[in-house]
Each structure stands twice: as C-alpha cells, then as structure tokens.
C-alpha cells in the first residue's frame, strides 16, 4: 500500500508540474487550424450564453506575450465536454470552477471535461503565453525596417481571435471584454472598449480598459506600439488616428479626421441611429489581407492599398461597418456578404451626398457572376477560399435594385428598424428582409431568395417593332430570371443624330414573368438604340436587340454618358462570351470607337476586355492564327498611335502605353520595346518606372525575343528590391523553356502545407507565369500529370495554394477534348476540397466560353 501511495503521489506531482508549462502535445496537428466548423459552432451556441472575458496581457517582451484569462459563462447542460478555442499557446495553469487541471490541449482546442462543468454559472481561468503572428491573422508583430520600432495590431477575421486568448471563437457568441495591458512606457494602446486609466509601472505602463459592449470575438481588436497619434472629436465621440512614426509625415491627418467627422455625422442622420460606441480609432498598418478591417470601434487600413491622398471611400465604408457589421453582426460566415455589401451601398450613397460624386461602381467593371451570393460555409476556413469580389458586387447590385424598388426613404427606414431591433445582437438575411417588409408593407422574402440564394444571371432583352418612325409594340423579355417576382429597371432610348447618339427618353418600368409589354412606349419615336438597364439599377445581363447592337458597334463612342459607354462595352463583351456576337465584330468596334474615348474608367474596362480577347485567341491556336496575328497587330498599332497622340493627357497616355506593351507581339513591336528599355528610343511623356521595366522584360521573355534573357539578368542585378526579385522570377518562369518549366513544375507538385511559407509566396508567383495562354504546347506536356495528381496535390496543400493552382494550372486548350478531361474530374467530387471544386467548375465554365467564342467565329472568317 505504501508503494502504491508513493507512486500515486509521484504521478500527481508530475501532473501538477506539467500543468505549469504545457505546450501543444502529441495530438498537435502539423497545420495551423484556425477554422471553426458550423456544426461545432451551432452545438456550442445552443449550450453557452452570457459570456464575458477578463483578459490581462503582458506585451513588454518581443516574440511572445503572456496572458491571463478568466472566462465566465452560463451553461445549459453538463451532458458532454465543452471546447475552448486557443491557437498554439503554452498553458501554464488551468483552473475550472476552482479546480486545477492538467490541460487536454492539442494546440488548437482546449477541452473542458463534463465532470468539472456545472449547470448555470461557470468560471475558467487560463494562464498562457503565445507567439505574435508575422502573417496576416492574429495579433501581428511588425518591426519597422526604417527605425527598428516594434508595433502590434490585430486582425481576427474570421476566427483567429483564439490566437489572442482562449475564447468561444464564433460570431454568434458575443461577449463583453474587460481588458488590461502591460506595455512599454512609450507605447500607445487602443482596443474596442475605451481606456479607463494608464498607470506607470517601472519601465512599463498598465492600461486599464472599461468593459466593452457585447462583441463577437472576430470584431474585438488591439493596437499597441509607439504609434504617432492624432485626435479629434465629433458630437462627443473621441476620434483617433494611429500611424507608425516613420509614416507620420506623409499622412494628411487633418483631412482624414475631418472626413471621418463628416461621415459620422451623415450616418447618424441617414441611419437614424447614433454612433453605437463611445470612441473610434483608425490605424494605418503595414499589411492586411484586405484594404481595411473594421472591428468594433476601430478600423485598420492596409497602407499598401491606400490610394494617394486621403482614402475617402475606404473611410466611409469602414465607418459604415460600425453600424452594419459591429452594432449588428452576422450569425455565421455565410452572411458576411450582407454586412459588407450593405455598408458599401450606404457608403457609396454617403459619398454622393457629402462630396457630390462617387467613384465608378465596381460591379460595372466585372462580368456578372452566375454564382449565388450566399454560399454554404461549413468551416470558417472556407470564407476566403474564393475571390469575394464577384459575389460582393452582385450583392451590392441586388441591394441597389431593392433600394430602387422600395425608394430611398423606405429602404433607409427599414435599415433603421433593423439596427434598432438587432442592436448588439446577431442577425441574418431573413431578419434584414423582415425589417424592410415592416416598412414597405409588401412581401420581399421570395424576391430575396431569388436575388441572393439563386444561381445564375437574368438576361434582359428589349423586343420592339416600329410603324413608320413610331413604336408600335415594345416588350421586355426575361431569360433565366425570377419569373414570379416583380423587378424594376430604367429603360434608356437613344436616337442617332448628326453628332452621335442622343438620349430620347428614360422610363422606369416594372416587369414580371417571361415577357412584359410596356404599353406606355407605344407611339414614342422609334429608337436606334435601347439599353434596358440604364443607370445600372438591376443585376442583369443586357442582350441588345439587332438594331441596337448594330448601332452600338458603330457609334458607341459618340454617347455622352461615360457610365453608359462602359456598360455597353460590358454588354457587348458578355455577348461575345455567350457566343452571340463574333469576337472579330467586338474587336472591330474597339478599333472604331476607342480612339475617341476620353474617360479613363471606360478605357480601363474596354482594354481589360481586349486583354481577355487576346488570351482567348492565343488559347484557340493554331485555329484562327491568321486572324489573331492581324487583330493583335492592329490593336498594338492603335495603342502606340494613341500613346503618342495623348501626350497632353498623362492618364490616357499611360493607359494606352500599357495596352501597347500587352499587345506588342510582332517582332517589330518587341524590337521597339527593347529599344525603349535600352534608351535607344523614347516616347515623350512615358517614364519607364521599375515596375514598367519589369513588365517589358517579362513580356519580351514570355515571347522569347532574342537577347531577352540577357536583359533579365541585367535588370535583376540592377534592381535588388524584393519586388524586383519577384518580378525577375516571374520573367524567368515565363520564358518558353521546357527544362526551366519542368523544374518549377516538379517543385509545385511536391509542395505541401509543411513547406516554408516563403516558398508558398514564390510558387504562387511561379504559377501565375508558368503557362501563359500562348504556350499551349508547353502546357500540354504536363497536362495529364496535373489532372492525374490533382486530388493528391489538393490533400497535401492549403486552400491558398489550391486557389492559385486551380486558377493557373488546370489545363485548357479551347477544345471539346479538353472540356471532357476537366468534366471527368467531377466524377468523384468527394475527392476534392471545396476550394478545388470551385476552381474546377470555374475552369470548365471558362473552357465552355472559349469554345462558344471560337464556334461563333467560324462563319465570319
């Protein structure tokens, strides 16, 4: 018995000693796992409520910080264990309802046994230490290379608040936070709650914060460092702006804070709701995965993404999210689009009201996405597994249509109801639509289901006939639309005169079903062009009738309204991709209309479509090779001519030169670029910046211009910057060298999650340049291997890697054989991650588009 007691005592001592410094043990997975599954979140939310956190953080040391956390919550039952999220921490002590315990911790999840939980109130205490992040999630540490100063800032979206402290890291478990921070004495500290006191302690300061309003973990925030700060006030709300010391002189803080004041005052009036938090802090930080991140009472802006001058639009959008993303927060990640899109729409309205104009709507710059807005997200890791812009643009446009149908007053009253009813709570699309229905007094749920949860894009076509010079009948035909709900658009009718196209009539029209007769247009002058989505009030693809198509192809450039010109270019391009308009007709129209274009945004949009046309022609090779050579040369010559003639307008000249660079595929054009690079020739007004020099070098290497490899090596020695070295790698990989490509291809295929993160960034750059559209033969050499090994590559790699892989390396050749190879991948969809499946489906859709475009060209060439 004495021996047994001695062994038991020894075992207990070992357990207690181990509890004093517990690192992630043998259960730790090799890959960081910041994801939270929807099923776990739902189950946990059904049991846990009334959560509060008391956190003390010691930030005085580099590399790691220490923390003490007290988590209080109510528990509905004790039938099973409960998990806390905590990423890559060292736990020194764990106390559950007064009892010390050796942590059951795998480096990601801290499991609390059911036997130590109690129905009702629970208290968990955790002492821990954690590393700072040097990526774009978590509590990020940045050492300024200019002066060596250390800065901290947080980015917890979607589920990396668990890197700060143990938490229930899901959006629908809001909690109040009581925070204290020990930091070096020369640091400033800011967070979601307001500062209560600052007390000197030796070489440090202890910052105490008031208790926060209930906040979702991903919307909590922390800033700490020797930041330069500016302060202001708006209607009793304290405003702060933080920036690194080395950046302070370049920031127009007065304008920044003034525009913030204007925006805050505007939103309080427009939304009928006071700013929900007692202070607002904005910080300019080194790098984020997006332009900005709006947390509760604080926004961080990515300094790399900021435009020159004060970022007016970003300030407006970020502040709008304080109401529409922090006062009311999503329930789960499949609703993030609603918060952000609502905020962006409200911000764009605010920009028009406050400053009299807005930048061009992004949704007009993109082909309208057939994907549904609301996507099922089984795990928070899937949130950014795809490009968010297409669905976000679609959501903004659909909300704009809803505003147009209800009218501004009702729409904003509905938002006010929504904010009042769900303040400091979590809500979803149904809650928002219900708030609008209460004001509008009309059912909207069926409309919202079709607008946000249905795949596909409605095609809208005007069909009319004329007797003499007057309309005898006018119908709106709807294809692939929601036939049951009423939609509203603006019809624009235009007449061709001596000096171009002139607006004859604009009419608001409600339509429903497959065909709607517009009786009020009977007897109106017969138009030369009809555009059935004037001012972009609906998210529809416009199919031009035959007469309007012919008019647009010849006279598009004579329209006075820049936005309408851009939308017409988009409609023409969508008709090309649908196989309805031959690609040569589109290219011919650009050669006729673009030389007179004076609006940079219209030019950017049309030139982007020309670049897509070039890629399609190169993928068709050797089919259409003769036409392709002629068309690309014609575009290059037009671009060079307009580069020279627009020297009085730097913005237009720069756009035309960059277009020339892209289309300079003839030997003569490439020789001209090489001469510009060597300064043997020049173009007045054009400066070859380092970025432009690398673009020329990459282009010359991609098309194997004689001596291009020597130019690459010479420039690489000259430009030793990180950007220069990355560009040199892209240029090298783009060369049509089978040996070079094979070496890089094998490194890509062998990559895994455990590889060096810096290698991932390098391979992402490689994948973008490995198989350009004109290097079909080199691409086909490894095509079968890429398809055969796709499932294994998918299993070994992260979603970020697979997003790049599927976008760049799934083989295409604009043929039915290629299409069948890709479609065969879907025979076993369970073998692929959601990211890879989306990539496969997008590639199949792109291949189908290319085939349609190619077949539509056959009778014309």
Image (spheres, rainbow, N blue to C red):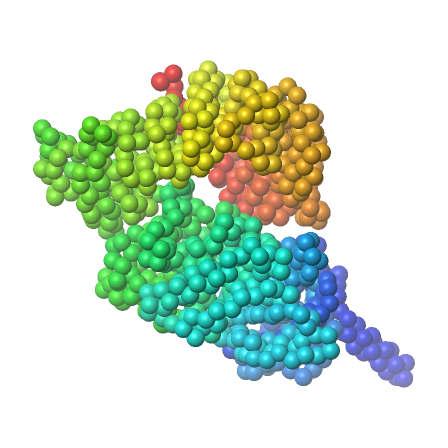
Is there any visible trace of residue 620 in the rendered image? yes
Please tell me which residue lies in front, 504 or 642.
642
Residue at horizontal 30 percent and vertical 45 percent from the top:
536
Q: Is residue 598 above or below residue 14?
A: above
Please tell me which residue lies in front, 457 or 509.
509
Residue at horizontal 23 percent and vertical 64 percent from the top:
441
Is there any visible trace of residue 370 in the rendered image? no
Q: Is residue 547 above or below residue 39?
A: above
Q: In terms of image quadrants, where is residue 503?
A: top left
Residue at horizontal 68 percent and vertical 54 percent from the top:
146
Quadrant in which the N terminus is drawn: bottom right
Residue at horizontal 42 percent and vertical 27 percent from the top:
645
In the image, is 243 to the left or to the right of 263?
right
Quadrant in which the C terminus is drawn: top left
Tally of numbered discs: 0
Residue 557 at x, y percent in the picture? 31, 31
Q: In terms of image quadrants, where is residue 81?
A: bottom right
Residue 174 at x, y percent in the picture? 50, 71
Please tell me which residue lies in front, 97 or 803.
803
Q: Give the residue at the far right of this rendering.
A: 3
Residue 352 at x, y percent in the picture? 34, 54
């Amino acid at each position: 018995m004495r021996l047994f007691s001695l062994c038991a005592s020894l075992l207990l001592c070992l357990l207690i000693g181990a509890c004093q410094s517990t690192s992630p043990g043998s259960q730790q997975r090799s890959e960081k796992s910041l994801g939270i599954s929807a099923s776990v979140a739902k189950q946990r939310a059904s049991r846990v409520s009334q959560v509060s956190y008391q956190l003390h953080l010691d930030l005085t040391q580099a590399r790691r910080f220490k923390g003490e956390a007290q988590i209080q919550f109510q528990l509905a039952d004790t039938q099973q264990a409960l998990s806390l999220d905590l990423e890559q921490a060292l736990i020194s002590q764990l106390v559950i309802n007064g009892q010390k315990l050796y942590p059951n911790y795998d480096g990601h999840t801290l499991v609390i046994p059911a036997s130590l939980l109690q129905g009702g109130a629970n208290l968990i205490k955790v002492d821990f230490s954690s590393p700072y992040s040097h990526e774009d999630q978590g509590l990020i540490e940045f050492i300024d290379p200019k002066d060596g100063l250390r800065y901290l800032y947080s980015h917890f979206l979607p589920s990396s608040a668990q890197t700060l402290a143990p938490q229930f890291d899901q959006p629908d478990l809001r909690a109040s936070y009581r925070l204290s921070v020990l930091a070096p004495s020369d640091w400033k500290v800011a967070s979601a709650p307001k500062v209560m006191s600052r007390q000197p302690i030796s070489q440090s300061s202890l910052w105490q914060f008031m208790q926060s309003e209930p906040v979702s973990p991903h919307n909590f925030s922390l800033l700490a460092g020797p930041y330069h700060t500016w302060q202001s006030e708006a209607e009793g709300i304290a405003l702060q702006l933080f920036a690194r010391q080395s950046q302070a002189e370049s920031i127009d803080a007065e304008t920044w804070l003034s525009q913030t004041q204007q925006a805050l005052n505007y939103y309080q009036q427009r939304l009928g709701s006071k700013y929900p938090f007692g202070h607002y802090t904005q910080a300019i930080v080194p790098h984020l995965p997006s332009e900005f991140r709006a947390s509760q009472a604080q926004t961080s802006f990515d300094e790399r993404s900021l435009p020159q001058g004060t970022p007016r639009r970003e300030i407006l959008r970020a502040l709008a999210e304080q109401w529409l993303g922090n006062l009311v927060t999503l329930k789960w990640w499949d609703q993030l689009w609603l918060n952000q899109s609502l905020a962006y729409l409200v911000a764009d309205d605010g920009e028009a009201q406050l400053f009299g104009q807005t930048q061009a709507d992004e949704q007009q710059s993109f082909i309208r996405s057939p994907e549904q807005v609301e996507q099922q997200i089984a795990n928070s890791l899937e949130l950014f597994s795809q490009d968010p812009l297409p669905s976000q643009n679609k959501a903004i446009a659909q909300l704009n249509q809803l505003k147009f149908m209800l009218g501004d007053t009702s729409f904003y009253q509905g938002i006010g109801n929504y904010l009042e009813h769900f303040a400091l709570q979590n809500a979803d699309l149904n809650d928002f639509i219900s708030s609008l229905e209460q004001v509008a007094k009309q059912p909207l749920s069926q409309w919202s289901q079709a607008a946000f949860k249905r795949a596909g894009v409605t095609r809208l076509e005007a069909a009319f006939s004329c007797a003499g010079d007057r309309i005898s009948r006018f119908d709106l035909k709807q294809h692939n639309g929601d036939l049951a709900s009423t939609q509203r658009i603006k019809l624009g009718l235009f007449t061709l005169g001596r000096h171009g196209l002139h607006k004859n009539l604009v009419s608001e029209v409600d339509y429903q079903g497959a065909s709607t007769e517009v009786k009020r247009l009977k007897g109106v002058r017969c138009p030369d062009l009809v555009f059935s989505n004037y001012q972009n009030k609906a998210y529809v693809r416009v199919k031009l009738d035959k007469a309007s198509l012919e008019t647009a192809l010849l006279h598009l450039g004579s329209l006075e309204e820049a936005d309408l010109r851009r939308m017409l270019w988009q409609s023409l391009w969508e008709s090309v991709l649908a196989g309805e308009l031959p690609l040569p007709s589109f290219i011919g129209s650009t050669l006729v209309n673009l030389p007179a274009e004076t609006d940079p945004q219209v030019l950017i949009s049309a030139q982007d479509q020309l670049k897509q046309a070039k890629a399609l022609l190169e993928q068709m090779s050797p089919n259409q090779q003769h036409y392709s050579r002629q068309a690309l040369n014609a575009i290059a010559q037009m671009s060079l001519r307009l580069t020279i003639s627009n020297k009085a307008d730097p913005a237009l000249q720069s756009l035309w030169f960059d277009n020339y660079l892209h289309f300079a595929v003839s030997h003569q054009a490439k020789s001209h670029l090489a001469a510009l690079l060597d300064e043997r020739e020049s173009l007045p007004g054009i400066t070859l910046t380092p970025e432009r020099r690398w673009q020329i070098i990459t282009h010359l290497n991609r098309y194997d211009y004689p001596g291009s490899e020597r130019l690459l090596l010479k420039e690489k020695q000259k430009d030793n910057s990180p950007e220069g070295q990355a560009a040199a790698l892209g240029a090298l990989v783009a060369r049509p060298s089978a040996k070079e490509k094979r070496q890089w291809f094998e490194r890509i295929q062998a990559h895994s999650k455990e590889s060096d993160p810096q290698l991932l960034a390098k391979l992402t750059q490689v994948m973008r340049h490995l198989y350009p559209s004109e290097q079909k033969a080199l691409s086909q050499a490894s095509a079968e291997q890429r398809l055969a090994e796709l499932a294994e590559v998918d299993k070994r790699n992260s979603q970020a890697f697979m997003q790049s892989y599927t976008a760049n390396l799934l083989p295409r050749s604009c043929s039915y054989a290629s299409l069948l190879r890709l479609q065969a991948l879907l025979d076993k969809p369970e073998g692929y991650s959601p990211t890879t499946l989306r990539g496969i489906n997008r590639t199949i859709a792109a291949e189908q588009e290319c085939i349609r475009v190619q077949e539509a060209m056959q009778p014309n060439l």
